Amino acid sequence: MSAIVEMRNITKHFGHVIALAGVSFDIRPGECHCLLGDNGAGKSTFIKIMSGVYKPSGGEVLVEGAPTLFQSPRDAMTAGIATVYQDLAMIPLMSVSRNFWMGREPERGVWPFKTFDTGKADEITVAEMRKMGINLRGPDQAVGTLSGGERQTVAIARAVYFGAKVLILDEPTSALGVRQTANVLSTIDRVRKQGIGVVFITHNVRHALAVGDRFTVLNRGQTLGTAERGTVDAAALQDMMAGGQELALLEASLGGTI
Amino acid sequence: MTDVIPDALKDERIKPVSPLRRALIRPELGGICGTILVFLLFAVVAGDSGMFAAEGVMNWTVVSAQFMVIAVGACLLMIAGEFDLSTGSMIGFSGVMMAILSVHIGVPLWLAIIATFVFCILVGGVNGWLVIRTGLPSFIVTLAFLYILRGLTIWGSIYFTRQTIIGGVAEKAASDWLAPLFGGKILGGLFTWMGEMGWIATFTRGNRAGQPVIDGIPMLVVWAIVLVVFGHWLLTRTKFGNWIFAAGGDALAARYVGVPVNRVKILMFMFSAFCACVFATCQVMEFGSAAADRGLLKEFEAIICVVIGGALLTGGYGSVIGAALGAVIFGVVQQGLFFANAESSLFRVFLGVILLTAVIMNTYIRRIITGER
């Protein structure tokens, strides 16, 4: 199957700092491609290029085979690339329904008396959330009352509903408890089965192995290659993320617990 | 996670919400309770003073309407996450500007009014643009404009007329087509009829004998009602209203999903300036003059109305209806103390106490909504 988005040899410099030194990555429909890396490895910079926040210093971004340069996050969204940021997904004081439709509110009536079609918005929100396995008390329930995992799920449901072809999840599980993490991972699985390509950014090898089809490890702004599911194990990924050497020493002293 | 298990999980984890608690998180609740309380209080202490006769009602209605006009602008701006401290100075500035233009430069009054509105809305836009571009808190940027506009008002007034009160607007307004939109009264016939029917008091002596004590509803009250209805509709029923909540709730999150946060905020600064201008124009038409010291402290009074109405100072939550009720509380208490023959300086004590109570309540309510502990 051909890739929806392909990133070829991407470089990014911030002044004298080389954040990315030639990273290649691609995402196909219906797969979960995990992007692993330690803090400072360049994961965030890389996905910000993919989602149109930054422009690459070098390299090519191809969307369905055509070279593309995103001018803004809006461009990337139009191309079907949706990003769910860990802490910036939702506005807690607003209702689930208002959050779900934020920026894309359905309207009815004629200008200048166009109104926000709350009936339709509420109905679709409740239905979409039910598909994701969340039963709301009501569409007017404030997002602040949802758990972290549920908020991620609302954001994912929103991206899927609005026709995302590629869903970038920026460390969706890093702040969550065990059960919530399981919920988010199963949501990823559900989304993947709908034919959407999921880019799952994490530094937790076990979370990645639970749902990933392919794994790409970033270390110090460089990619150490992409591995298929079944060809790597947790220890190998862990080693690549940390750059091998030092962690081997550490691991020995900790009795192989990390 | 399968489709079946979460239902069971949900039910055991979510406590049922009582109707009382549900009502508590409506932003207007404080305003409604306060309004009822204030009316009850003054019905007891000032019930026989004429406060609730036709003339008295009109008295506190007009004062409440004044607060309402500026509170609507302040409310939408606060929900969008910003403050405008230049409202009071803007009131003084726009009044003096239209008086100088029409009385001293000789521009037709309608043109002076339109020019003033355009200029003040632009100043509001500059306020917003500066806040967005510099990233400074709107508190600082609009505080600067509080001084800039007030200074310009006094300087301009003295430079053109050698005094700080500019009269002569009434004569210009008499033959103007636009002035009655701000200074006129409506439903005069209704009140005459009510006077004839003996439902409201009439003058018994003088050259107005037989006419009702109230000769119509001032346009200021009409403006207040129109602005409240418009503001409430905009905020709760439109796409733009959702953007106002989003811009104030979390500007970055809103931006990431494509909400034009900058445009929303700048437009709300402009709307706040517009409201200040409406207030000033009505006042100038009522008094027939402009004065350089008008509108002093109005920015804080507007903010107090909005906070009493349940809006959060941090943005993202609030209600125009609540702000309007805050304005009613404000107006009724200010005038009620007068009717009750109470020491008027006590009004400020009351203001301080009610402000503190409202903010504490709002903070508590916010905790309920967001589920923080």
Image (cartoon, grey):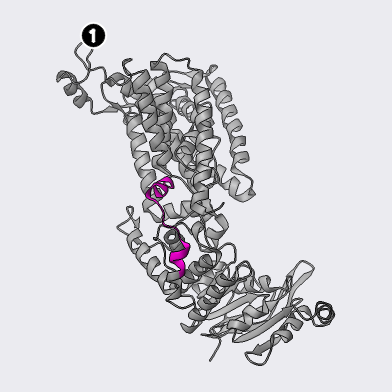
User: Which amino acid type is marked by label 1?
Assistant: Asn
Chain to which mark 1 belongs: B
In the rendering, at what x and y percent does residue A231 appear?
Answer: 67, 92
For residue B125, side relative to residue A54 (left or right): left
Of residue A83 and residue A240, the one placed in the foreground of this image is: A240
The residue where tag 1 is placed is B207
Q: Which residues are drawn in magenta? A: B9-26
Is label 1 in a helix, a strand or a loop? Answer: loop
Q: Is residue A206 visible?
A: yes
Residue ranking furthest to the top: B205
In the rendering, at what x and y percent does residue B307 appear?
Answer: 49, 38
Residue A234 found in image quarter: bottom right
User: Was residue B348 drawn as part of the magenta stretch in this picture?
Assistant: no
Q: Residue at x 41, y 54 (%)?
A: B17
Of residue B323 and residue B240, the one placed in the foreground of this image is: B323
Residue A70 found in image quarter: bottom right
In the rendering, at what x and y percent does residue A129 appear?
Answer: 43, 69
Residue ranking furthest to the front: B12
Q: Is residue B107 visible?
A: no
Q: Residue at x 42, y 52 (%)?
A: B241
User: Was residue B11 drawn as part of the magenta stretch in this picture?
Assistant: yes
Residue B330 versus residue A2 in the image, above or below: above
In the rendering, at what x and y percent does residue A28 appear?
Answer: 55, 86
